[in-house]
Image (spheres, rainbow, N blue to C red):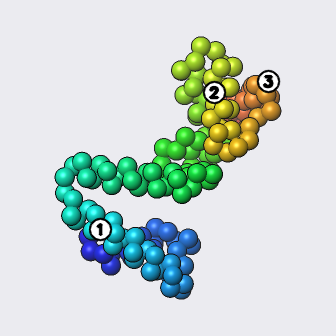
Amino acid sequence: MEKKELITKLAEYLGDDFDSKNKCCEELVDLWVEAAGKFRASNRNECCLSTMKSMLHFFVEESFKNDYIATKNAMFGDLFEIRTKGFEDRYTLNVKLHKTYKAAYEKTESEYKKTFSKRRYSSYDSFRQIRSRKMKAKEADSIS
């Protein structure tokens, strides 16, 4: 793919985050694409491509350490899933890894707090009550 085509696709992907009217954004995107292109073009070995991927992940992780990056397969899901379904899905995964439901909940809550700097629920009992209500509502919907 040529540089110009890549920048066009990147601008489409970035959408509102890319200010094409602002020259500095366009120049920075251009520099970033050029640097990545040079690295990739001069290093065709699998180890170099692996290094490039690792550098990308490192860059994203370090640049946004305090922000949750809702990428595909992110721990708590995408932006629409973080508060509800994402926590539930993560809890379900942790249930398989821990001996008790409470231990799975505490692990999920710990991961959530590490990611978002706050707890999702006030206690295990609160989580259980809300989860129970949701399950009853789902059952009622499926019956009707």
Distance from label 1 to label 3 (Cα)?
A: 53 Å
Residue shown at the point (51%, 51%) measured from the top left: 61
Locate residue 106: give its quadrant. top right
- Residue of label 2: 107
Q: Nearer the viewer, mark 1 or mark 2?
A: 1
User: Is residue 144 visible from the viewing direction of this image?
Assistant: no
Structural crowding at the residue carrying mark 1, measured as other residues with C-alpha within 10 Å and reported as few (<14), some (14–19) or many (≥20) = some
Please tell me which of labels 1 and 3 falls first in the chain.
1
Q: Which residue, given by chain and number where applicable, does mark 1 sit on?
A: 37
Amino acid residing under circle 1: Gly
Q: Amino acid at mark 2?
A: Lys
Identify the residue at horizontal 52%, vertical 44% (top origin): 74
Residue 3 visible, this angle: yes
- State the quadrant of the C terminus: top right
The residue wearing badge 3 is 125
Q: Is residue 86 above or below residue 54?
A: above
- x then y, percent, for residue 99: 59, 13
| Quadrant (top left/top right/bottom left/bottom right) for the N terminus | bottom left
At 72% across and 33% down in the image, what residue appears?
A: 134
Of labels 2 and 3, earlier in sequence is 2
Between 68 and 139, the residue placed more toward the observer is 68
User: Which tag is nearer the camera, tag 1 or tag 3?
Assistant: 1
Q: Secondary structure at mark 1?
A: helix
For mark 2, does the 10 Å Cα neighbourhood hold few (<14), some (14 to 19), or many (20 or more) residues? some
